[in-house]
Amino acid sequence: MSLVVVANREPLRQERGRWVPAVGGLATALLPVLERRGGTWVAWGEKEADAVPRLAHPPEAPRFTVRRLHVPAREVTGSYHGMANRVLWPLAHYFLERVELRRAFYAAYQATNRRFAEAVLEEWTDPATPVWVHDYHLMLVPALLRAARPGARIGFFWHIPWPPPEVWQVLPWTRQLLEGVLGADLVGLHTPEYVANFLATCRTLPGAVVDGQRVRWQGRTIRVEAHPIGIDTARFAQWAAEPRVRERARRIRRMAGTPLVVVGVDRLDYTKGIPERLAAWERLFERYPQWLGQVTLYQIAVPSRTRLPSYRLLKRLVDEQVGRINGAYMRDGWVPVHYLYRAFTPRELTAFYLAADAALVTPLRDGMNLVAQEYAWVTENGVLILSSLAGAASVLPEAVAVNPFDVDGLADTLHEVLASLADEPGRRRWDARRAALKERVAALDVHRWAERFLASLEGSPVTLAGASPG
Ligand code: ADQ
């Protein structure tokens, strides 16, 4: 049966005049599902949505449609750059001091969500087709769809952390947003912790009854489940086996010129803990000068949300930090931090993962964090150092867990891990944990994630308002 996917981002991008699949977890996971089942992906058409409101894909033998919504620039400013990125994003990641409450943001968000819901209703010709809505940009959409189609099957997935109700108290619109999400039949989050926080938040909603992992609300029953997302393991395995990728990995090691190489890969976002990680790198050399000239960090950061002043400020901070560390410690051709501020192809990232003896994945908060899974999957002899505040920590218990705020602790852990990699018996101590991590990542595979969520959504009984026993 076909499927309607609703997400802020479009799944295709233009490359030399052709539309090709976008890079990124969601497109990777759901394009094959849409190709198999047929259906529609409704998204914000960032560029030229007026000129190209609809795409049939693949062009030579169309299997599904992309409906590209035109959103007026002023509305984008309030809804996307405002409500989504300056209110909901910091709030969900516990950065309350960064939340900018403005009525105009919420008004624009309501307008954009209505716009999305109207477009979905136009595309959604068969009411039996399930609809899968994604993420914090579209919290009001499930209830808008429910109002129009009471008997429909609607799923919602939340990709970032869901904080406890005390955090949601900061927001004047929590009730409306929660009511919006509860228009769905199935709400998916990455971890049991987020599920518990979501249920606890529902308990604050007058009239909602929480019973186990179910919420009874307005005569319907909504199920809440943990569905941790994974990566495209088959494609990463294929890239890691390509001779030119392996050659590139060797070049990366040669370029570093040190016995050990460490990698960090992130969007440049304040939730990713990059300044704290660099501070720990600096602390490592202060406390353990034996590592000078022995280890190199490649920090890869993809530019993100560069329109927002707070992200530009972060960029300046990181630039300065890298300059300071390199200025203080660079010697005899050794550069302590190679900082690469641009996007890379997944193949190029795979080469870095292959090259690195350890990865530092130290977000201050993260819904899941796919870089952790990518590294654990690709590396052949490396160690994953992972923030215990990332969703990934709950699915990758064999990683070396760290507190990303504790700079001294992070420097100590780094020292211990690096020291263990200095000889062969030490290196072999990690083999069992590395193998266990690979099994975990294989089981989480993104295609299975999509299948599991959809199977649960489609297996659920539809409860019409007023018709449920509760
Ligand atoms: P993100 O916050 O974007 O995703 P993450 O899960 O780490 O975070 O995914 C980032 C993706 O971008 C990875 O696949 C990575 O390879 C890629 N990437 C990073 N730096 C890059 C660079 N310089 N060039 C090219 N690609 C780069 C949100 C949530 C996460 C959640 C995902 C999926 O914040 O917590 O895991 O959605 O649900």
Image: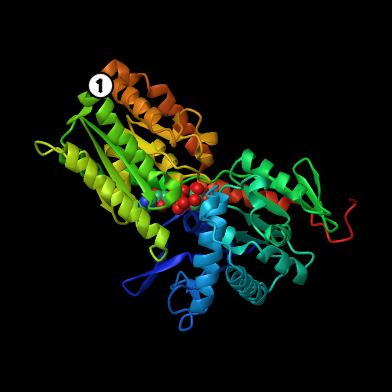
| Residue bearing mark 1 | 422
Position in image of residue 169 (x %, y %): 67, 52
User: Left or right of 326: which side holds 467?
Assistant: right
The color scheme shown is: rainbow
Point out residue 189 in the picture as x, y percentages from the top left corner.
62, 47
Q: Secondary structure at mark 1?
A: loop
- The correct choice, above or below, for 133 with respect to 290 in the image is below
434 lies above or below 21: above
Query: What amino acid does circle 1 point to?
Result: Ala
Outermost residue toward the top in this view:
425
Viewer-closest of 290 and 46: 290
User: Is residue 460 among what the camera can see?
Assistant: yes
The one nearer the camera, 256 or 207, is 207
Q: Residue at x 56, y 64 (%)?
A: 83
Residue at screen point 50% across, 74% down? 56
Disc 1 crowd rating (10 Å Cα; few below 14, some 14-19, many 20+) is few
Q: In the rendered view, tell whether residue 437 sits above or below residue 21.
A: above
Residue that lies at the very extreme toward the bottom in this rendered image: 51
The answer to whether 458 appears left or right of 61 in the picture is: right
Residue at 28% over, 46% down? 321
